[in-house]
Image (spheres, rainbow, N blue to C red):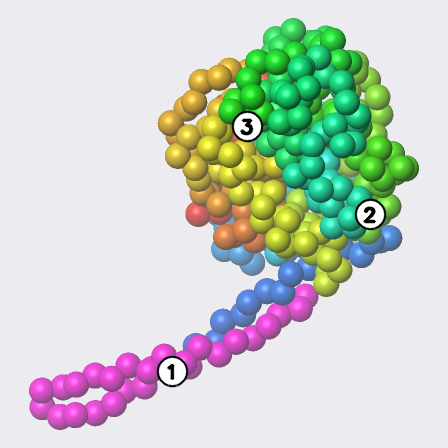
Amino acid sequence: MKYITSTILSLILVVLTSCSKDKVEPQIETEVQEMYFPAIADTEWETITPAELNWNETEIAALNTYLKNNKTKGFMVLVDGRIVIEEYFNGHNANAQWTWFSAAKSLTATIAGIAQEEGLLNIEDKTSDYLGMNWSSLPTEKEDLITVQHHLSMTTGLTDHVGDYIPWVCTTPNCLDYTADAGTRWAYHQGAFILLQDILTQTTGVGFQSYGKAKLEDRIGMQGNWTKTLGLNIYNSNTRSMARFGLLALNKGTWDDNIIISEDYFNEMTTTSQELNKSYGYLWWLNGKQSYMGTTSQQVVASNLIPDAPSDLFAALGANDQKIYVVPSKSLVVIRSGETAGETQLGLSSFDNELWGKLNAIMN
């Protein structure tokens, strides 16, 4: 492992009533660990033990039992890019793929940022600049209010049809109805998200899947693929590929000195994108805000997204409890894939906070 040794000098002046004398504390040396990136075309991945991090190892068995009993397939924890925990349960293994579901929204938002930086896209442009006029059933003056940025922030104002699957995923004009002006209503709309992928296909000329593979996935060693099912584009990969994307996010778009996406766009993407749902960026979920909205309701909840998690956490969340958590303050990435842990939700579920309770028992 690589370490950077830094010397911290502490000088304390102690004034005694009987005499005046300077006392200098001994030098204290601390070791700061350098960020690690696994090689692109290699299965080797450096590890660090929980003991080396002074974690409470006695709680790991309870975590593993909890994960297994809650239908987890793959689970990883990285610190500074190194594997601390890697476990597979319920017939899964390191080579097996699993679907990200809507956690792939965050991957798509990152690909959109790359396209913008290459001059192929401007997220402030109207959607109709890429999909043509009458891509929806809205009057022209309402359709013209919708920009690419509204697709990224889930604020197109289109009727979301939550609870009615076919119109919820539909992208034909007759399904895309007006509910509110763009930017005035937040709603978790799968069809509006799919249109973002259509925009990327139009503007890149090669399809958003091929573009994302060449510009992002291959450059950080991800091994995954997109498949079409039930009207959705589903991304599938092994657990380590999810961890690679999480590590890229931890480093704000840079992979081992190679800039995949600019830090400016990455910061914009993982900052509150509108005031309606403060816990949502550009297809990323954000902790530490004063309120959030869920995926199936217009209710605003006056709480952090995940109360027991670090406030600076941001996450890619998918249906049936697919999780990519990134915590910059702890240089931490946590991955969970599998079947639903019990509460079937499109993104956030009660499993998030329960899992962080288990993790806190180990890390704190």
Report the disc number at residue 183.
3
Using the rendered image of the protein, determine whether residue 269 is visible from the camera's viewpoint: yes
Left or right of 179? Residue 136 is: right
Verify whether residue 18 appears in magenta. Answer: yes
Q: Which residues are magenta?
A: 1-27
Q: Residue at (79%, 50%) from the top-left corner?
A: 118
Mark 3–mark 2 CB contact (< 8 Å): no
Q: Measured from the top left, where is residue 41 in percent x and y?
A: 86, 53
Displayed quadrant of residue 12: bottom left
Element assignment for label 3: loop
Please name the residue that numbered disc 1 is placed on.
Answer: 26
Return the disc, 3 or 2, that comes first in the chain's sequence.
Answer: 3
- What amino acid type should be assigned to the residue bearing mark 2? Lys
Please tell me whether the stretch drawn in magenta is mainly helix, strand or loop. Answer: loop
Q: Which mark is residue 215?
A: 2
Between the residue at mark 3 and the residue at mark 1, the CA separation in whole angstroms equals: 58 Å
